[in-house]
Amino acid sequence: MNAQRTTATLVGALFLTAMVASLVGGGLVESAIAAPYDLAAIAANDALLIAGILLELVNAIAVLAIGVLLFPVLGATSAPMARGYLALRVVEAVFCAAIIIGPMALMNLGGRQVEGGGVDPAAAGALGALAMAARAGIVSLLIPVFFCLGALVLYTAIYRSRLLPRFIAIWGLIAALLILAMNLLSLGVTLDITLALLLALPMILNEIFLGIWLIVKGFNLSAQGDERDKAATTAA
């Protein structure tokens, strides 16, 4: 009982941590590195950039930790969904960590430029554009796709097991589909920023609510007992 309650509290705190670290970290990195990618300007914002990179690493660790901590919880009701959710969160965490490679490379080049490395401005601009384009591709497509797939597995498992109230699961499923649709649409058209925020808002609010619920209320432990009783009855 105490272990389950501790797990719920940790998972709730990690959901909130991942949300804040992702939004704030991404904002700091994007503000520190902006076109036309002047290495001297990037070097001047190195403290801001380092803070953003560290927060994005915190997000990656939190994403992985959520998958690991929820594995036994989901496994008590559905082993396949527990394995699937963990695998999707591992892949998502890898991509969340990969997006810091470009900014770190540009920060390193900026430091050399300040020390008299003599990096050609045109080459620096091209390298910056390439690095940030690669980052944007991961941020706008790969991370959202694996995040949404993981959310769909998680909320389906929650809906079936009643580990949490079903309205949270339904809310999360709808929000995940909206995020997935938004990012797939963005491949072909440029979405208005207001529309993009409206499509993302349900998921942002859902994860904040989920994190607070887990910290305050925890899991519905009777749901796991019911599933074990059903399994025992079926086996008999």
Image (spheres, rainbow, N blue to C red):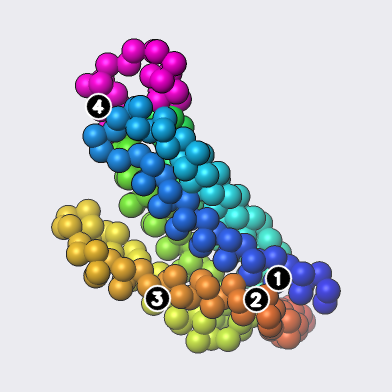
Left or right for 230, reference 122: right
Task: Please tell me how crowded label 1 is: few (under 14), some (14-19), or many (20+) other residues with Cα within 10 Å.
Answer: many
**Residue 143, image x, y percentages:** 42, 52
Q: Disc 4 versus disc 1: distance between alpha carbons?
A: 46 Å
Badge 2 or badge 3: first in the primary sequence: 3
Check the image and name the residue furthest to the left. Answer: 189
Task: Please tell me how crowded label 4 is: few (under 14), some (14-19), or many (20+) other residues with Cα within 10 Å.
Answer: few
Residue ID for mark 3 = 202
Badge 4 or badge 2: first in the primary sequence: 4
Residue ID for mark 2 = 214
Give the label, 4 or 2, closer to the camera. Answer: 4
> Dividing the image into 4 quarters, which one contains the C terminus?
bottom right
Q: Main secondary structure of the magenta part?
A: helix
Mark 2 falls on what kind of element?
helix
Q: In the image, what residue type sits under mark 4?
A: Ala
Task: Please tell me how crowded label 3 is: few (under 14), some (14-19), or many (20+) other residues with Cα within 10 Å.
Answer: some
Q: Disc 2 versus disc 3: distance between alpha carbons?
A: 18 Å
Badge 2 or badge 1: first in the primary sequence: 1
Badge 3 or badge 4: first in the primary sequence: 4
Residue ID for mark 1 = 9
Badge 4 or badge 1: first in the primary sequence: 1
Residue ID for mark 4 = 126
**Residue 216, image x, y percentages:** 68, 80
Mark 1 falls on what kind of element?
helix
